[in-house]
Amino acid sequence: MKLVNLYNKMRPELVKIENQLQAEVDSDHKLLKQTAQHLLEAGGKRIRPVFVLLAGNFGEYDFTKLSKVAIALELIHMASLVHDDVIDNASTRRGYPTVKAEWDNLTAMYTGDYILARSLILITKLENVHIQRILSKAIVQMCEGEIEQIRDLFNIDQDLKNYLKRIKRKTALLISVSCHLGALAANADKQTANSLKMFGYNVGMAFQITDDILDFTATSEQLGKPAGSDLKQGNITLPVIYALQQTNKPQISKELIELIKSDDLANNVDKAIKLVKESGGIEYCQQLSDQYLDKAYAALKPLPDIQAKKYFYDIAKFIGQREY
Amino acid sequence: MKLVNLYNKMRPELVKIENQLQAEVDSDHKLLKQTAQHLLEAGGKRIRPVFVLLAGNFGEYDFTKLSKVAIALELIHMASLVHDDVIDNASTRRGYPTVKAEWDNLTAMYTGDYILARSLILITKLENVHIQRILSKAIVQMCEGEIEQIRDLFNIDQDLKNYLKRIKRKTALLISVSCHLGALAANADKQTANSLKMFGYNVGMAFQITDDILDFTATSEQLGKPAGSDLKQGNITLPVIYALQQTNKPQISKELIELIKSDDLANNVDKAIKLVKESGGIEYCQQLSDQYLDKAYAALKPLPDIQAKKYFYDIAKFIGQREY
C-alpha cells in the first residue's frame, strides 16, 4: 500500500486539522497573521497530526480530543522550524521562502514565539494534566537540543553518541510524543501507549538519519533546498562524522577537515559531498537507519492487528525507501 | 514608608523565590545553564513576584501556591527580555552585559525559548485551569506586542493610542496579571481580584511611561544603559510622539523628523533629547503617568485596609517619584 492512500483516506480529518491550524494562528495583527499564514501555506507532511490520529485508533478514538493534541504538536513543530531557519540562515524550506528570508530574523524570532505561545493556549485547554506535562517537557528538551546544535556548528570533534542525542531532541522526540499522546488521549492502556512511544522514537530517528543522508544524495529539486545545505551551514551530520572517523582512509578525513575549516566551504561543497560518499558514510547511515526501522517494526508487533497498525508499517517502510 | 522596607520585610520569601528561580532554569546543558544563570545574576526588581505575593494577602495566603505563579511570571518576563535585547540590539541591561552581547543573537533566541519553555512546565503544574489560561493568553498578547514593536521602529506616524496599546502589552499586562493571579491563587473573591488586576494595569502603564521619560531625563549611570537608548534604536516613545505632534512648534517637529530619518541619529541623540524636552513632551508624559497612578490608587480604595494595601500604595507612589 502506498502512503498516498493513507493520506487520501485521512483527508477529511486532515482538512479539519488544517482549518483548525488556520484558526489557531489567526491574529488581529496583520504581520503575525501574514507570517503564520505563510508558514501554513508552505505546508509540510503534517506527520505529527497523522501519527496522533493513527495512535488514537489503539484506544477510544475521539477526533475532538485527538485534534487538539495534534494541533498543539504541529504548532510546536512549526515554531521550532521558524527559529531553526534563523540558525540555519535558510532562505527556502520545501522550496518555499522562509519567514526569515521573506521578512527578517527578528520577525522570524517573534513569529516562532507567537506560534509557541498559541500552542501553549491549546495545551492549557487540554484537560489531561499528564499530557500537558509530557508536552511541556518535550518543548524544554527541544530547546536544549536546538542550543546544542549551535554549539556543534562546524565542530569536527563530534561522535555518534553526540549526533544521536541531538537528532533525538531535534526530531525523534516530537514524533515519539505524537504517538504516545495520541494513545494517551484515547485512553489506551499503558503498555500500548509505551509501544507506540517506542515506535515513534525509532521511526523518528530513522527519519532524521534519512534526512541527513538525502542532504548528500538527493538533488536540489528533490529537497526543495540546495543539496549539501546542512554541511554548508556547518551542521555536521552523521555521514560527515563517519567520514571524519575513517582512520583507514586518512586522506579523506584530512581533505574534509580542510574544507570544513576553510572560508570557502560554500563553494566547495560538491567536493565535500564526494569525499563523504567515498568514505562509505552513506551506506553506514543507511544501515543505522535500517536498524532503527527494525526496532520500530518490533515495537509495533505486540499491538492489535488493526488498520492503523498497517498504516504505521507503511510509514516506516516509506521512510526506509524515501528518496526526497 | 520607603520601598526598601518592603523589600527588607519580604526578603525571606524573595530569597526563596530567587533560589527556586535558580532551580527552575537549571539545565544539564552547560551553555543554557550559563546564559540562564547570567540572566538571573543580572537581577532585576522582581516586581512581578512582589506583586503576586502582596496580592495573595487579600485571600488565603499560601506561599507554595503563590510562588509557583510568581516564578512562572518572572520566567516569562525574563524570556521576553532576552528576546527584546535582540530586537533592541542592546549590549547592556541594568549595567550588566546582555546575553546577546556576551554570547550572540542566536544563543539569546534559544535562551529565551528555553526559559519560556521552563515557565511552561511550571504553568502546567498549576492545578488551577483558569490561572493557566490567563497566563498563556498573556504570553500570546506579549508576543503580539513585541512584533508590533518591530513594525513601529523608526515609524514617526504613531499616535497616543498606538503607544498605549503597545506599552499595555509590553509591560502593563504582565504586572496586571501578577496582581490578578496572586489574588486568584489565594482564592480571593472576584471583586477583589478585579480591583487588584486594575491596580496592576494602571501601575504598569505609569511604570512604563516613567521608564520612557527616564530615557530622556536620567543619566546613563542611573539607567545602567546609555541615555537616549530607546530613540537610538528607533523606539519612538511617547515623549517623542508628543514632540512630533506639536503643530504650534513646527520647527521642533521638523528637526526631530530629520534627525530620526537621518543615518546619523546615534551621534545626534543629544540634540533629539533637547528637542523633546523643549516640546514639553516630558511634562505631558508626567501628567499622563500621574493620571494612571490616580486610577491605580482608586482601584485600591475598595480593598480592605491590610498591610499589603499600604505597600501597594507605597509602590505606586514610588513609581510616581522614581528617578532611575
Image (spheres, coloured by chain):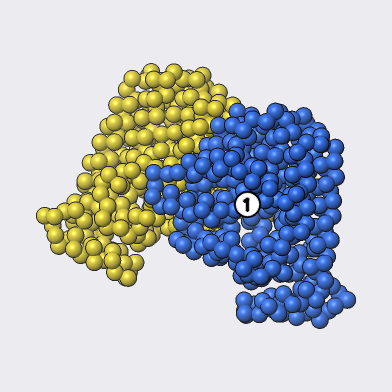
Chain colours: A blue, B yellow
Report which quarter residue A132 is drawn in. top right
Residue B271 in view in this figure: no
Residue B40, x across and y down, in percent:
56, 47
Q: What element does badge 1 sit on?
A: loop
Image-based side of A106 in relation to A252, left or right: left
Q: Residue furthest right?
A: A248
Give the amino acid type for the residue marked by disc 1 in the picture.
Lys
Q: Is residue A2 visible?
A: yes
Horizontal side of residue A207 vs B113, given as left or right: right
- Total numbered badges shown on the rendered structure: 1
Q: Residue at x 35, y 46 (%)?
A: B166
Quarter occupied by residue B191: top left
Where residue B88 appears, as percent x and y from the top left, is 43, 58
User: Dot 1, crowdedness within 10 Å: few (<14), some or many (≥20)?
Assistant: few
Q: Is residue A195 above or below residue A201?
A: above
Identify the residue under disc 1. A45
The residue positioned 41% from the left and 34% from the top of the image is B176
The residue nearer to you, when weighing A216 against B319, is A216
Q: Position of residue A195 (x, y in %)?
A: 80, 39
Question: Which chain does the numbered disc 1 sit on?
Answer: A
Q: Residue at 38% of width from left, 52% of height from top?
A: B149
At horizontal 60% and vertical 53% (from top left) the residue drawn is A44
Measured as percent of width and height from the top left, residue B24 is found at: 62, 41
Nearer to us in this view, A33 or B301:
A33
Q: Quadrant of the C terminus of chain A?
A: bottom right
Left/right of residue A133 with respect to residue A118 in the rendered view = right
Farthest-out residue, left: B248
- Judge left or right: residue B36 versus residue A215: left
